[in-house]
Image (cartoon, rainbow, N blue to C red):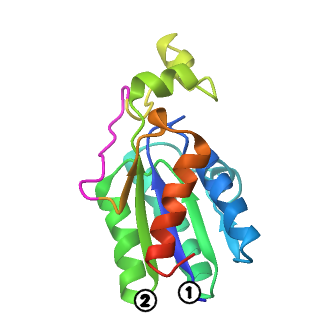
Amino acid sequence: MSGATVWLTGLPSAGKTTIAYELAGLLREQGRRVEVLDGDEIREFLSAGLGFSRADRHTNVQRIGFVSELLARNGVLVLVPVIAPFADSREAVRARHQAAGTGYVEVHVATPVEVCSVRDVKGLYAKQAAGEISGLTGVDDPYEEPESPDLRIESQDQTVRESAAALYTLLTERGLA
């Protein structure tokens, strides 16, 4: 079976990683080769030393896009839960996949910032509100929502399992699951 990249973009604490790991479990039960390229792990190991300027964010996304396309080209279904706040960075990743003939699916985990700030799994929204950090995507740093994602998930309106199932259905319809 051919590989593909499934890019899950959205605000911090939107549910991207949680949905990705739920979906990975479903796919592995079906015998599918799956990898999750978690944005936090990539920051620690592949993009250590990069900051959060627009240029550094772009570089981080391009590194992830390179690795995901490489894995996908070799038959792995790659789930990429990464904020990737800028449309031009995401488009460059899509173009890389298209140029290589590798499958690419963009998913917008479209959780409203008000819901994300309540979830606040990493405490980022609280730190930003307290003035301890700045540059939080969707609060005081931009997030450019995808204009036409392959799937939009409103995670505040469904369970993690339902979100993963919706994505699984899309992948099945496209012959990628």
Q: Which tag, 2 or 1, sits closer to the chain's start?
A: 1
Q: Residues within 10 Å of mark 1 (few under 14, many from 20)?
A: many
Q: Position of residue 8 (x, y in %)?
A: 48, 55
Decide whether residue 45 is among the magenta residues: no
- Magenta residues, start to end: 139-148
Q: Residue at x 26, y 58 (%)?
A: 148
Q: Residue at x 34, y 77 (%)?
A: 95
Q: Nearer the viewer, residue 19 or 80?
A: 19
Q: Which mark is residue 100?
A: 2
Seen in the picture, residue 8 relative to 109 is either above or below; the reply is below
Q: Name the amino acid, label 2.
A: Ala
Q: Position of residue 126 (x, y in %)?
A: 55, 16
Whether the residues at callouts 2 and 1 have beta carbons within 8 Å, the answer is yes
- The residue singled out by tag 1 in the image is 73
Taking 148 as reference, is 69 left or right? right
From the image, give the main secondary structure of the stretch colored magenta: loop
Seen in the picture, residue 10 relative to 141 is either above or below; the reply is below
